[in-house]
Image (spheres, helix red, strand yellow):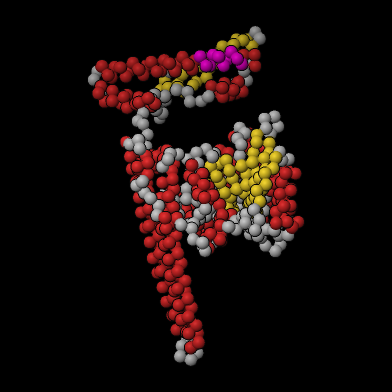
Amino acid sequence: MKKIKGKASNTTEKEFVFEFKAGKHNCVLKVPLLFPVQENISDLHGRLMLLHKIPCYVENELKVSLSNFIEKETILDYDREAELALQRLTMGHVDVNQLANAWTSAYVETTLEHARPEEPSWDEDFADVYHELIHSPASDTLLNLEHNYFVRISELISERDMELKKIQERQAAEMDKVMHELGNTLSDHDVNAVASQHFDAQQVLENKWVTELEQVTCIQKQEYQEWVIKLHQDLQKSNNSSQINEEIKVQSSQLSEPSDSGDRMFEEQPQMEESFTIHLGAQLKTMHNLRLVRADVLDFCKHRRHGSSGAKLRRLQTALSLYSSSLCGLVLLVDNRVNSYSGIKRDFATVAKECTDFHFLSLEEQLEEVQQVVLYARAQRSSKQKDQPELPRNGSDDKSKNVERNPSNILPGEFYVSRHSNLSDVHVVFHLCVDDNVRSGNITARDPAIMGLRNILKVCCTHDVTTITVPLLLVHDMSEEMTIPWCLKRAELVFKCVKGFMMEMASWDGGVSRTVQFLVPRSISEEMFFQLSNMLPQIFRVSSTLTLTSKP
């Protein structure tokens, strides 16, 4: 045994000796090994067999002998190091108190029973308190307070829209006067100066209202959370909850429903719906609910300022299931940019701002976090691709170039998730990225949008989303090229794919009953709706049907 120069002081070389017979000859194998042995014994044994051409009939014997040798010498090294440590301790070369503190710290950090309990966060405490209160007689008081805050925000938004409309009308009149004088007393430079002044004035007004709405939202959120905590503490101290519920009363004027209200007329727009019950599975069948609904996608998100009893019940159901294993999700089709500045994303952001979210971050803050995650994921993916050899990409060159051009964008089929407590019927929104290809009539089951639906359903299974609303035609608005044959072909494809994905759910979540709502645009005709409602039971082999159809 000798120490290796240049190595660590505790690295030693020992000779392994193995004797065996090969016919009439006695053979001896001598191999130097470095201790402590860092290699896998099976790998070391295999290399010895290959390099030294050891006969196969002594393979097991060599492995046993090698294992015993390594174990024995390792124990001897540990004993030798322990003896040296004890000698240093007895000779006073080691501080006993420092050693005891190190042992105590290591034991406490690695032993679960001595670990410090996790400090509860404010969000977790508030979630527990809210869940308890919303399932108590105080639920009506909570909903009334939320409605009060919603009315306040709605009034501010109405004032903002009114001021913006007035300034736009005034600026339009001023611009008309300037254009009439163009070429006479005014030049193009004067027109540009007036347009610049109008733009600056409008920006100042918009920024002023953005700041005011943010301040009101922050104040409402803080007041609401503090009030919920205080109410919970008071309920724990007092058994008479009816007296505490009298602390906040909703004014009758705020809850009154005027006879001539644009919001009221909006609520009474007809909605067609048909429900089905299906049983899927080979041996263990699971019951699921399917719905075919004709409505706008944002109808599942909007609150009603002058809501009916049905709207209030839906809001109560959404609040009751906020912290539960029965969440409601919605698939929103968006473009490849993670923002809220255009199209359906802007409309959704407008709806999300109409009511303060008392439980989660605002939509803008959530999108900022998503943006950071996308950038990090793109950086990780590009670094891995650089380490790998070049492979033919076929048709993915355009997508790769698009990502390289703007790494903050997402690809078709990818999606990001936002959480909400201030929407009428939805807790989770899946923002699925689609491109213009979904408007063509030649997509297949391997299209990114279809595969994105599959991944969304898988996330629903792993995160307790038991109700999911899916755009059946993979579009939110109808256009001229979307004829009846186009709609039937697209609906058949989505129905069959979703059925296959639901069959897979049994292996994902053990067969939990779920509700899938297929959403078609409100602009679709009644004839088309009934054709789709006849197609669905044929594809899913429906067990029973419940028709809930309201006509104008």
Judging depth in this view, the residue of 480 and 312 nearest the camera is: 312
Would you say 509 lies left or right of 214 here?
right
Q: Position of residue 289 (x, y in %)?
A: 64, 41
Judging depth in this view, the residue of 45 and 423 nearest the camera is: 423
Q: Is residue 159 visible?
A: yes
Would you say 381 lies left or right of 88 here?
right
- Residue 273 forms part of the magenta stretch: no
Indicate whether 336 appears above or below 12: below
Which secondary structure type mostly characterizes the magenta part of the structure?
A: helix
Q: Quadrant of residue 88?
A: top left
Q: Position of residue 256 (x, y in %)?
A: 46, 57
Q: Which residues are magenta?
A: 59-68
Identify the residue at horizontal 43%, vertical 61% (top origin).
155
Q: Position of residue 153 (x, y in %)?
A: 42, 58
Q: Quadrant of residue 521?
A: bottom right
Instruction: Count how many numbered circles sit on residues in the image.
Output: 0
Identify the residue at horizontal 37%, vertical 25% (top origin).
113
Q: Position of residue 418 (x, y in %)?
A: 50, 49
Identify the residue at horizontal 56%, vertical 46% (top origin).
329
Indicate whether 471 appears above or below 175: above
Identify the residue at horizontal 42%, vertical 20% (top origin).
2
